[in-house]
Image (cartoon, rainbow, N blue to C red):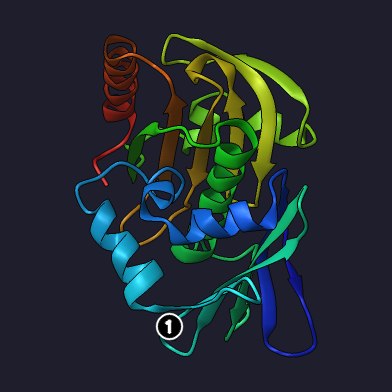
Amino acid sequence: MMGVTQDDRQVLIETTIAAPIDAVWRALREREQLRNWFGWDAETLAGEIDFIFFAHAEADEAAHVLQFGEWEGICDAIELAGDDSETTVSVVRRGPVVDWAGAYQDVPEGWVTFVQQLRLLLDRHPGAGRRTLYLSGAAKSGVAEPREALGISRLIAKPDGAEYSVSLPTGETISGLVWHRTHFQLGLNVTEWGDGLLVVSDMGVSGRRANGGGSALLTTFGLDEAVFRELEERWRAWWNVHYTAG
């Protein structure tokens, strides 16, 4: 997932998408496509997309590089390389080296999640609209961090692409393929959510999380309103018992 060269260039994530490079580039430049892989459903999403991808980014269409603005000495960029059949997507950072095994860091982990959502969209659902649910917060006293509390920690030992099936304490069984993982997060393709994605992150202990905590991001495709609302209510109910709002 990560590599560092002798200069300050660091690859935060690199993955291959089964789509032509021009199609991937359009997904980085068209607002409607960005809405279906970047972040999650929120009233602020459109503004965040404009701020990050347009107001504070420079697009080199010929080189297929999207360079984001500098922040506290750090510059991130998305670089594409590929052909008419598949594309390698890299998020590259110049600046202080990220310690992958150190404290949880929102931006690098976020890039991993979002690029994996991009891969899901273009590999499995090109042109489709998603619906998402995002939950986060600090663990209450005696509660484990989310991967353990949800009973999915053992899946970290499986390789990417391996099949899995697990019964969750939310009252459902999910199955599909192990999609990705980092030191802090685990992504599972979920057949039951319209071939969607579950990304569960353990954020560890901090000043705001005395007992640890984390997040769960559910990405769904093609669920009708009643099914999605039932899913949302079930997950919110379970989450609120174990974690504070974050």
Q: Residue at x 36, y 71 (%)?
A: 54
Q: Secondary structure at mark 1?
A: loop
Left or right of 47? Residue 139 is right
Residue nearest the viewer, comparing 216 with 53: 53
Q: Residue at x 70, y 51 (%)?
A: 20
Left or right of 47? Residue 109 is right
Hey, what amino acid is under mark 1?
A: Gly
Name the spot of residue 245 as percent of width and height, x first. Answer: 24, 41
Name the spot of residue 82 as percent of width and height, x first. Answer: 76, 60
The residue furthest left is 43
Location of residue 125 by image quarter: top right
Left or right of 194? Residue 12 is right
Asked if residue 212 shows in the view, the reply is: no
Asked if residue 107 is positioned above or below residue 35 in the image, the reply reads: below
Q: Residue at x 72, y 43 (%)?
A: 18
Asked if residue 213 is positioned above or below residue 6 in the image, the reply reads: above
Name the spot of residue 55 as percent of width and height, x first. Answer: 32, 76
Q: On the rendered image, what quadrant is the N terminus found in?
A: bottom right
Residue nearest the viewer, comparing 43 with 234: 43
